[in-house]
Image (cartoon, grey):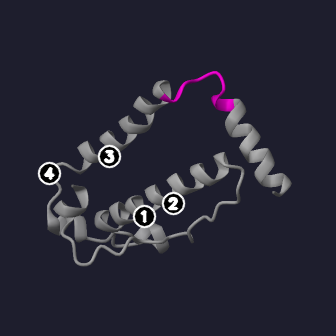
Amino acid sequence: MSNTYQEARAKLIADSSDRDWYDLWPTVTSVRAELLRTLEGVSEETAARRPDEGEGEAAWSVSEVVRHVLIYTGNVRAIVEETSRGRPAIKDARGLLADVGGATFAELRR
């Protein structure tokens, strides 16, 4: 295991040693709940609309942002699990969007 991974793992362990996961869980879930509340009432048309200006992620529609959150949620979980086991973790490429197979915005939100 490289020094970088050892240092990251040690930092995670040190930062969490005085806090129980059950203390942290409400913070983790509250951010996701806030996102879902923000998306309430957003129509399919609005969710599909891209900004008039911007490049890369700044040009994403709301639906694309949700697709990004979906795929990165799984990747972050994998990174945390692998790092906690002292193994190297693979970070997904920047700007990756989940393949949702034609799912509607309402389905993505659900």
In the image, what residue type sits under mark 4? Answer: Gly
Q: Name the residue under label 1.
A: 71
Q: Nearer the N terminus, badge 4 or badge 1?
A: 4
For this view, does 45 lie left or right of residue 38?
left
Q: Which mark is residue 35?
A: 3
Question: Which residue sits furthest bottom?
Answer: 101
Residue drawn at x 33%, y 73% as measured from the top left: 52
Q: Nearer the N terminus, badge 2 or badge 3?
A: 3
Q: Distance between the residues labelled 2 and 3?
A: 18 Å
Q: Name the residue under label 4.
A: 41
Residue 73 x, y percent position in the rendering: 44, 55
Residue drawn at x 16%, y 69% as measured from the top left: 45
In the image, what residue type sits under mark 3? Answer: Leu
Report the quarter where the N terminus lies. Answer: bottom right
Label 2's element?
Answer: helix
In the image, what residue type sits under mark 2? Answer: Asn
Q: Do the residues labelled 1 and 2 touch (CB within 8 Å)?
A: yes
Q: Mark 2 points at which residue?
A: 75
Label 1's element?
Answer: helix
Q: Nearer the N terminus, badge 1 or badge 3?
A: 3
Q: Do the residues labelled 4 and 1 touch (CB within 8 Å)?
A: no
For this view, does 78 lie left or right of residue 62?
right
Q: Does the magenta stretch include residue 17?
A: yes
